[in-house]
Every structure is written in C-alpha cells, then in structure tokens.
Image (cartoon, rainbow, N blue to C red):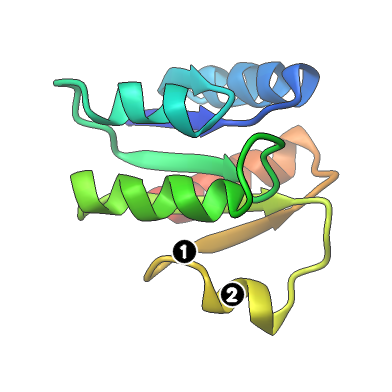
Amino acid sequence: MAIILIVEDEMFIRQSAEWTIEDMGHTILLAMDLDSALLHLSGSRQIDALFVDIRLAASIFGGYDVANQAIKLHPALRVLYTSGSCLSADMTELFVGGGQFLQKPYSPAQLEHSIGELLH
C-alpha cells in the first residue's frame, strides 16, 4: 500500500480524507501548511502520493507551492489537487506534470476512486 501525504488546512476535511484513505489500507501523513508538509517531504520516508488543497490559507500559491516543492524532493510523486473552485485552464497550467484534480465537496467514494486512479 502507499504512503500518502494529505495537506489540508481545514481540520474536518483533513480528518475525513484521512479516514477514507486509511480505510483503503494506505499509510497517511498529515500537514496543514507548506512548512509542515516540507517537514514530511524532507524526511527519510518515501512518500508515494500527495493529496493537496490548492487554497491553503497561509500561502499565496498554496497547494501549488507544496506540489512544486514536493516534486523537487520526490520526482516520482503522484499529485492529486483539490479545491472548492471549479477547475479552470489557469489552474491546470500551475499543476505539476501528471497532476490530477478532485472537486470539493467530494464524497468518500469519489475520493477513493480518485486515489485509486492516481496510484495506478
């Protein structure tokens, strides 16, 4: 199973995503901002995927910054972005290569499907 870093600043959403992905059998690491995400990313653990909110309160480019830094440290990392905003061409231009998107609000089943697609 995979090790997945969830970066989400809203506690309820972060916890819900954690439970859903853990129920799939994956190991979860949690962060609420760029700095805490970088602590996980610069550690010795191999991280397989990043599930990141595009709009993090403490950063201008939020999830884009997290994903760009993550790819520098883990080039094979798979990235799933999420946001309450509708996906636009301007948003996808900022995605790392191969980045995927899941629109909020999402159901546990939609998250499971997106994580499954991301990892295969």
Residue reaching furthest to the left: 44
Can I make out residue 113 in this image? yes
Foreground pick, 23 / 6: 6
Three-letter code, disc 1: Gly
Disc on res. 1 = none
Q: Residue 4: percent from the left, percent from the top?
A: 41, 31
Three-letter code, disc 2: Thr
Q: Which residue is mark 1?
A: 99
Foreground pick, 21 / 41: 41
In the figure, residue 86 lies in which quadrant? bottom right
Above-or-below relation of 12 to 21: above
| Relative horizontal placement of residue 92, taking residue 37 as reference (left or right) | right
**Badge 2: few (under 14), some or many (20 or more) residues near its Cα, within 10 Å?**
some
> CB atoms at circles 1 and 2 under 8 Å apart?
yes
Above-or-below relation of 85 to 87: above
Alpha carbon distance from label 1 to label 2: 8 Å
